[in-house]
Amino acid sequence: LELQIRLREALAGGEFYLEYQPVVDLGTSQVTAVEALVRWNRDGEEVGPDAFLGAAEESGLIVPLGEWILREACEKVAVWRLSDWDIGLSVNLSVKQVLSPRFVRTVEGVLAETGLPAEVLTLEVDEEVLLDDEGDAVARLGELRELGVRLAIDDYGMGYASLAHLRELSVDAIKIDPSFIADLGRDDTVTLLTHTIIQLGRDLGVQVVAEGIERPEQLEQLRVMGCDHGQGFLVARPMPAGGVESLVGGEAGAN
Ligand code: G
Ligand code: G
Ligand code: MN
Ligand code: NA
């Protein structure tokens, strides 16, 4: 409860900030998008989302916090795009947020205010969204997709969602869970499953993003398997907006 009160003050006091992790095209190594990741500056110390998102969800603060995250990230990427840099944006959503009554209108409003084209924004949801009994979350996500935004299933392969769930919800991307990538090339079953997910994505016309790439041989194997995109500490760590600007300084404005 203490934490919930503190988080409310933190949002009002502007203590949250975003880092951005580059996503690259594994074929060309170009940065094609960034994933926004929230952090909390608590008295000068960086606190990661695992330490506060649970409490933010319980208290309902995730709704205004999520809206702040979405607006902040869309504003930033809209500015980058003004310099002719064709960059995409991914934002994580929690189920609580998706189920909040005005969420679809919020996304529509943020896109209108920031001028970010809908198709530039990918909203990431965990597999658990597909397990929502009432099916309200799946319906909401369908409405979001009608706005023209892209949907991605995050942490795919953790075991909650079967392949069949992908039929109920049309998604644009699957993000393979880092635990799979960690054992790639070391565990035959995991390697086979990863290959199968990549193949499935291709067959369904869904983009596949590998997360948690830390070693060069993982990157090479994913390339050989035909995985579209990748993300991980080997490629680039999450960094402040300024870091992304320096990293792609050569690219921005060049195309
Ligand atoms: O950034 P980090 O590795 O600490 O992220 C830990 C977890 O927090 C991940 O599951 C990630 O998806 C989640 N997360 C990070 N930023 C956000 C956000 O802005 N909104 C939501 N809902 N989850 C986030
Ligand atoms: O659940 P989600 O995929 O949204 O989580 C994203 C988080 O994963 C990021 O916040 C980042 O801190 C973490 N992450 C990104 N790349 C790597 C990596 O290569 N290794 C590990 N261990 N974590 C990573
Ligand atoms: Mn994510
Ligand atoms: Na996530």
Image (cartoon, helix red, strand yellow):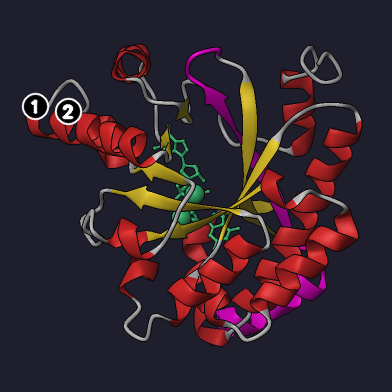
Dot 2 alpha-carbon crowd within 10 angstroms: few under 14, some 14 to 19, many 20 or more: some
Q: Are marks 2 and 1 in contact (CB under 8 Å)?
A: yes
Q: Residue 191's mark?
A: 2
Q: Residue at x 82, y 70 (%)?
A: 13
In which quadrant of the rendered view does residue 61 lie? bottom right
Residue 38's x, y, as percent? 63, 55
Distance Cα–Cα, label 2 vs label 1: 5 Å
Q: Which residues, given as a range, are shown in magenta? A: 1-28
Quadrant for the N terminus in the image:
bottom right
Residue 99's x, y, as percent? 53, 81
Q: Is residue 134 above or below residue 183?
A: below
Residue 250's x, y, as percent? 79, 12
Residue 169's x, y, as percent? 40, 62
Ligand 2 contact, mark 1 (Cβ < 8 Å): no
* Local SS, label 2: helix
User: In front here: 28 or 46?
Assistant: 28
Q: Residue 188's mark?
A: 1
Residue at the left extreme of this rendering: 188
